[in-house]
Amino acid sequence: MLYLFSRTSCDPCNTLDEFLNEINDTRVDRIQKINIQEGLASEEELATAEKYGIRTTPALVVTNHDDVVLEEHSGALDITRNLRRILETRLGG
């Protein structure tokens, strides 16, 4: 599973959303986007963020079928490059 944690008030998160819309890659449908914006996030979204220790956005978390974290990335630096690599290597084909 690939989780993308974001906030609507986060400019890098919004840039990442634009990137996802522009890359025309069907694998982006397999990303679970989780909004952790205070006042807008559901209890389930907040619980998922807490489970993976998310403190900053944007953040990516890749887990295996046993829910073991395989890879993490937080912050805006290189996130689009890492997301593209994750899509190709972790969500191949």
Image (cartoon, rainbow, N blue to C red):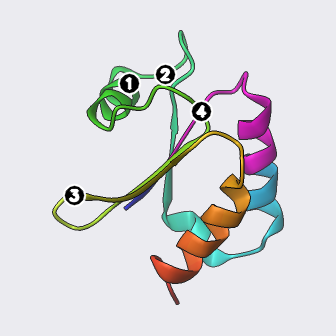
Q: Secondary structure at mark 1?
A: helix
Which residue is labeled 2 in the image? 41
Q: Residue at x 63, y 28 (%)?
A: 7
Q: Earlier in the sequence, mark 3 or mark 4?
A: 4
List x then y, in percent, for residue 56.
Answer: 55, 28
Quadrant of the drawing holding the N terminus: bottom left
> Which quadrant of the figure has residue 57?
top right
Q: Earlier in the sequence, mark 4 or mark 1?
A: 1
Q: Secondary structure at mark 3?
A: loop
Q: Secondary structure at mark 2?
A: loop
Q: At label 3, which amino acid type do we have?
A: Val
Badge 3: few (under 14), some or many (20 or more) residues near its Cα, within 10 Å? Answer: few
Q: Residue at x 16, y 63 (%)?
A: 66
Badge 1: few (under 14), some or many (20 or more) residues near its Cα, within 10 Å? Answer: some
Which residue is labeled 4 in the image? 57
Q: Earlier in the sequence, mark 1 or mark 2?
A: 2
Against 71, residue 93 (above or below) is below
Q: CA distance from mark 4 to mark 2?
A: 14 Å
Q: Is residue 80 toward the left or the right of residue 67 in the image?
A: right
Q: CA distance from mark 1 to mark 2?
A: 6 Å
List x then y, in percent, for residue 84.
Answer: 66, 70
